[in-house]
Image (spheres, grey):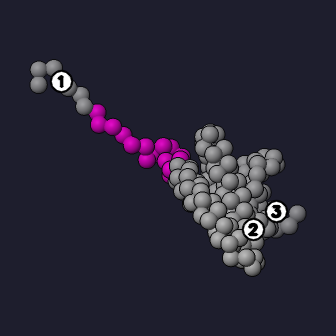
Amino acid sequence: MTNNQEFEKALRQELKEILPNTIWQNDDGVYSVFDRYSIAPKKPGYRVFCSATDVGLFSTSRAALSWCIADKYKHYNLAREILLLDTKLSSLNSDINVRANVGDRSKNPGFRETIETKLETKIIRKKQVENELANCVSRAKYCQQRGFNNETVRTGRNQTVKAGR
């Protein structure tokens, strides 16, 4: 056992209570998230694993971490939406890049203009998906910020009306 492995083992024994709430990066560059998820940087993005099960490939670490947060707090619809929107965004980015390159290489100005016109709707859709994904990431961030003991939950006013007053 190396010193790093011994240190990690000792740390796990001492800090069992806080490990389910920590995010840290190991020597390989893989993030251990909440002692349940792993986020591994891959060439086109970030691969997320949940208990050694492959969840999917995310384009950004922010989206990957947001998925982990939503799943941890059992907001499964939010987690599914984050994965779906991130996949759509990656697909749109690829499609836009390929079509733009085809248009740039074309010598026919009419064909180039047609491609640019068709790309406008895809670019608008890309912005919409980016906004929806940012909204989902913010919702996941709010789940995390509520804290481990729900200390930031908004409290309502307790208006007790006493009889006769």
**Earlier-in-chain disc, 1 versus 2:** 2
- Mark identifier at residue 72: none
Check residue 105 for magenta coloring: no
Name the amino acid type tagged 3: Gln
Tell me whether the residue at label 2 lies in contact with that at label 3, contact meaning CB atoms closer than 8 angstroms: no
Quarter of the image for residue 23 reads bottom right
Residue 110: where, in percent of width, then height? 68, 72
Residue 161 visible in the current orientation: yes
Q: Amino acid at mark 2?
A: Val
Label 1 – label 2 distance at C-alpha: 70 Å
Secondary structure found at label 1: loop
Kindly report which numbered mark, 1 or 2, lies closer to the viewer in this rendering.
Answer: 2
Which of label 2 and label 3 is nearer to you? 2
The residue to which callout 3 is attached is: 5
From mark 2 to mark 3, how far is it between C-alphas? Answer: 45 Å
Query: Where is residue 61 shown, x and y percent of the image?
Result: 67, 62
Q: In this rendering, would 133 be left or right of 64?
A: left
- Residue at the right extreme? 1
Magenta: main secondary structure equals loop
Instruction: Read off the residue under disc 2.
Output: 98
Say which residue appears at 49% left-offset and 47% top-offset.
146
Residue 139 coordinates in the image, percent (x, y): 52, 49
Magenta highlight range: 141-158
User: What is the secondary structure assignment of the residue under circle 3?
Assistant: helix
Residue 157 within the magenta-colored segment of the rendering: yes
User: What residue sits right under mark 1 in the picture?
Assistant: 162
Pointer 1 local density, CA inside 10 Å: few below 14, some 14–19, many at least 20: few
Of callouts 2 and 3, which one flags the residue occurring earlier in the amino acid sequence? 3
In the rendered image, the quadrant that contains the C terminus is top left
Check disc 3: other Cα within 10 Å, few if <14, some if 14-19, many if 20+.
few
Residue 18 in picture, x, y percent from top left: 63, 51
Residue visible at 78% across and 46% down? 51
